[in-house]
Amino acid sequence: MKNIVIIGAGLSGTLLTINLIEQGGSGGPVHITLIDRNPERDLGPAYSSREEALLLNVTAGRMGAYSSAPGHFLQWVRKKGLSAGEWDFLPRLLYREYIQELYQQAMKKKAKGTAMTRIQGEVTDISIRNGKAEVFTENHAFHADQVVLALGNFPPRHLLLANRSFIQSRHYFQNPWPDQVLDSISKDETVVLIGTGQTTVDLLVRLNRIRHEGKMIAVSRHGLFPLAHSTFKEYPSFREEIMKQNSIAGILRVVRLHIKKSKELGQDANAVMDSMRPYTQELWMNLTSEEKARFLRHVFRYFEILRSRIPPESEEVVKRLQESGQLTVVRGRITDLVPQDHHLEMIYIPAGKSRPETIASPRVINCMGPETDYFKVDHPLIKNLLNKAELQPDPFHLGMNALPNGAILHSDGTAHNILYTLGFPLRGIIWETLAAPEIRAQAEQLAHRLLQKP
Ligand SMILES: Cc1cc2nc3c(=O)[nH]c(=O)nc-3n(C[C@H](O)[C@H](O)[C@H](O)COP(=O)(O)OP(=O)(O)OC[C@H]3O[C@@H](n4cnc5c(N)ncnc54)[C@H](O)[C@@H]3O)c2cc1C
C-alpha cells in the first residue's frame, strides 16, 4: 500500500485529500494521512474564523473547488436555498462549510483500496532514508512514500527593532488571524494594527462588528489600504503583446497602456489585471532573475494594492471608521515598541517628519502579512528540513525551491520524488498561487501525479 502524508489541512491540504480520494481506486491501494495542528472543524487561517462578517475576497462565482466548475461553490450556496450572485462576496465561514461538506462526501464515496486518517498534531520533523520518509509529530511517527508540505501561511515576522523585548509582552500579538486575538478586549481600548493590508481590513471589520468604541490606529510606511473589487466586463486578452516583453519596464508599459484603454471604455484596472490572470504564472516564469528582483524591489507593493482587492463591503467599513475619526491611518516608520505594565508604547517617525511620536496601546497586532522567508520561520519542522538540506528557500525567499509542479528541489537542483508542496510555498516559482482558483488546479494535478508514482 502506498502511504501519502499531507501536512496541513488548510484549503490546499484538504483539496488535495479530496482529489486523492476522488481520483484514487484505480492505481492500487493508498493510505492518506492528513495532519494539522488545529482541530478538524478549522480550515487554515483564511477560513477558520467564526465571524460571519469576514467575507471572501474572491467573488462567489470563482471559488468552486474544481477547475472544471468554477461556479460549483455558487451552485452549492443556491442549493442551500440562499440567494447569491456570481459577483457576490460571501462569508468565509460558508466557504469552510462547503469545503468540509465536499470532504465528507468524498470520505463516504471513497474506493475500497483507499484509506484515510485525520490526525491532530504538530509535525516537527521528517526523516528521509532509502527512498522512504518518516514524519514525526510530538508523539507519533508516520511512514510515508510521499509527503506533501501544504504549510500555507506562516504568522508575520516580528518587526526588526533593536529592542526585542516587545516580543514577550502580553500586549503584542504576532499572529493576527485567530479569533482569540480580540478576546477580552475592553470597549474603549486603543488597538494598534501594524500594516494596512488585507489582514488589517479583516480586523477593522471584526472590531466594527463587535461595536468596538476605542480608537483604531493602522500604521504602515505608505498608509495605503487595498482597493475594493468592482464588477467589470471581461477585458480582451493582450497575452501576445505582453509575452513579447522580457523586462518589467516593458511589461509595465503595456499594462499601463491597457489600463488607460480600459478607462476610455469605462472600465477600470481591475478588468485589466483580471484578464492577465490566466497567464501570470507563465509571465513570471519567463522573466530573468534580475527582472523578478526588479519587480519585487520597485513594483510589488503597488501591484499588490491593484491586485489583492477587498470586498466593497469591507471598504465601506474602513471608510466609515475613517470618516467618523475612530480609525486613524498613520504613515510612518516604527522605531521602537516599549513594553509597559499595562500597554505597549509604540514610537514612530511620521512620514516627512524627523521627530518621533508615541502611541500607547494595550493591543498591538502584527498584520504585516505572512512570513515567506523560510530562514526566518521559527518552527522546528522548517529548521530541521533546512538543516538537513531537504528544503531550500527559492531565490527570492518567497517560499520553497521547487519545480512548478510542486516537486521540492534538493540543494543540487534535482527534484525530490518524496517531498512535494502546493499553494503559498510556490510563490517565488510561479507567483500566482495564493488563492482558490490556482490552489484547486494544483491540488488536482498533484493528486494525479502522486497516485501515478510507484
Ligand atoms: C486571512 C486570509 C484570508 C484569505 N481569504 C481568501 C479568499 O477569500 N479567497 C481566496 O481565494 N484566498 C484567500 N486567502 C488566501 C489563502 O491563503 C488561500 O486561499 C488558502 O486558504 C491557503 O490554503 P493553504 O492550505 O495553502 O494554507 P493555510 O490556510 O495557511 O493552511 C496551512 C495549514 O497547515 C497547518 N500547518 C502548518 N505547519 C504545520 C505543522 N508543522 N504541523 C501541523 N500543521 C501545520 C496549519 O495549521 C494550517 O491549517 C486568504 C488568506 C488569508 C491569510
Image (cartoon, helix red, strand yellow):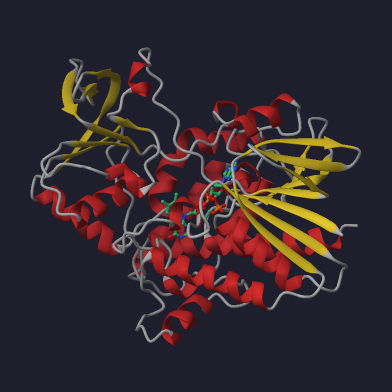
User: Is 256 left, or right, of 280 in this rendering?
Assistant: left
Report the residue at 69% width, 78% height from top: 109
Q: Is residue 261 visible to the viewer in this orientation of the structure?
A: no
Quadrant assignment for the N terminus: bottom right
Residue 69 in picture, x, y percent from top left: 59, 78
Report the residue at 54% width, 53% height from top: 434
Q: Residue furthest top?
A: 162
Q: Is residue 322 above or below residue 68?
A: above
Q: Is residue 426 above or below residue 63?
A: above
Report the residue at 38% width, 74% height from top: 87
Query: Camera-side residue: 409 or 233?
Result: 409
User: Is 83 left, or right, of 332 in this rendering?
Assistant: right
Residue 224: quarter of image: top left
Q: Is residue 77 visible to the viewer in this orientation of the structure?
A: yes
Query: Camera-side residue: 105 or 286?
Result: 105
Residue 5 in picture, x, y percent from top left: 72, 51
Residue 194 in picture, x, y percent from top left: 31, 35
Q: How many marks?
A: 0
Q: Residue furthest front?
A: 139
Residue 192: quarter of image: top left
Residue 337 in picture, x, y percent from top left: 28, 20
Query: Camera-side residue: 320 or 143?
Result: 143
Q: Is residue 180 above or below residue 334?
A: below
